Image (tube, helix red, strand yellow):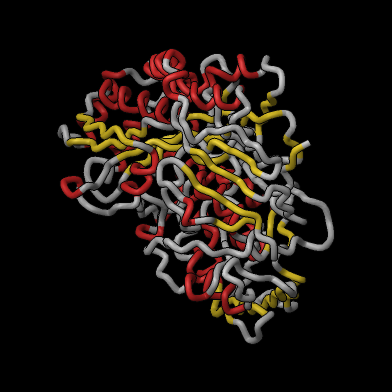
Amino acid sequence: MRRRGILTSGLAATAALMRPSLVRAEAATTLKFIPYADLALLDPTVSAFITRNHVLMVFETLFAMDENGVAQPQMLEGYTTEPDGLTWTLTLRDGLRFHDGTPVLARDAVASIKRWWVNDAFGQALAAATDDVSAPTDKHIVFRLRRRFHLLPDALAHPTNTMAAIMPERLANTPANVKLTEIVGSGPFRYLAAERVPGARNIYAKFEHYRPRPSGAPSFCAGPRVAYFDRVEWLTTPDPATQVAALEAGEVDWVEQPLMDLVPTLRKKRGLALEVMETKGLIGFLRFNFLYPPFDNPAIRRAVLKAVNQNSFMDAVVGAGGTFDDHCGIFPRGSALANDAGMEALSGTATVDEIKRDLEKAGYKGERVVYLSPTDVPRIAAIAQVGSDMLRRIGMKVDEISTDWGTAVQRSVSHKPLDQGGWNMFAAFTSGLDMSTPATAQLLRGNGNGAYNGWPQLPKLEALRDAFLASEDKVAQIALAREIQAQALSDVPYLPLGSYFQPTAFKTDLHGMQKGLIQFTGVRRG
């Protein structure tokens, strides 16, 4: 596997590759962190792990999810609902301020919600159920619904995909398809845009006027979010060996995603700790573009699904560094909605010759497949390599575009034809937290231009999702989840490649990390 070749060359060149920006932290008030990739896009509407981590630092949400999966008031003092469930009134806490010094007002929240729900899977469901959302006073946000939507707090609380980050009205009025360059939130850290070095460095400073919730205990993303560091430095360092060497030398405090091959060795190092923060795992996928041949053809997508061997994909990621699930359906193993419906499509029993015949029968005529293959994030590079080899093996003409992850993210949002910078397929990961419910599973949306990159139109899948969100009965939801999985494995909006648990590595003098996602509140030294 080429992944191991890359690792070997990186280890040999560690001394030469040590970056001058990775200097030893002299002050206990600075946290030095190596993210898994460069922060290429800053806007909260971007669906990428790296952007999500940034958003959790800079922004706040009206509700926040606790460790039990319950939405709790966060920026809110409280809320009320009318007996018919059609009117919700949310009341902001006193004293909230944005990083530019302006007060947080209800109209800021309304504008932010309207921008957020354009692209977010859960937000789109809330928008469809809403007649009007308004700010009758500076403190009150009023939702008037056209039908009951008991998941309203959950929609405004979910911390993954594209969360409902609250920003000043002047920024929230920017169309959702236009990416923000000015980043102003009301969260515990300010983003220092003037110190940004694209591809190398992003800097955050503690927001002195931030007001954590006055009561309760930190729980996942809910409760008091306290910043203990005055400054957090994200130092982009693509080479895995350089990352680990900097951590071992004490030049950085935290490496978000050490290469899995290095994990067994790191576990033996004194002064270092490894923990899985994303406790619902990471799920690999290959995403199709539905706008252009060949993957606008469902029979071709189903034929390619037969070629997926999840063991091969996950072994390329994990190696000897951990365990993985190579029987991963639409919902992650161990989640409340995990089931076996339609899983025969992922049996891996079809031969290459059988798949080639299926492709020919489906109408594949050797069309070029423009395949985005990120090289700078090891876990993504691993599945991308296995995926391109799989496509070639079954006879597809692959035009592999090797690029960095930030560029792949930027290109993946393009609707343009192939000869104008478009694409057919890309490799990436989503979180098990995202895929635990159809409400937040962006990959399951089939609403055309409103869907996640690839823009499938899948009316049967959409109808099942709508039924799931409308149901308040747990038994009915479980039955609908089986139907959703079976339909998804027939429509094939993406290829599920298996899941694994990625540990993060940090110095043992760091304490207070919250399980669930990478967060910087609550983290302290000593």
Looking at the rendering, which quadrant does residue 282 occupy?
top right
Residue 72 x %, y %: 74, 60
Q: Provide residue 177's location: percent of width, then percent of height.
A: 38, 63
Disc tally is 0
Q: Quadrant of residue 336?
A: top right
Depth check, front residue: 69 or 384: 384
Residue 69 visible within the image: no
Farthest-out residue, front: 26
The image position of residue 165, as x and y in percent, is: 57, 62
* Image side of residue 511 versus residue 287, left or right: right
> Considering the image in quadrants, where does the N terminus appear?
top left
Residue 176 x %, y %: 42, 65
From what the image shows, is residue 189 above or below residue 293? below
Q: Residue at x 37, y 30 (%)?
A: 375
Q: Residue at x 72, y 76 (%)?
A: 91
Pick the residue in front: 415 or 458.
Answer: 415
Nearest to the observer: residue 512 or residue 424: 512
The relative height of residue 218 versus residue 137 in the rendered view (above or below) is: above
Quadrant location, the C terminus:
top right
Residue in view at x 61 percent, y 72 percent: 101
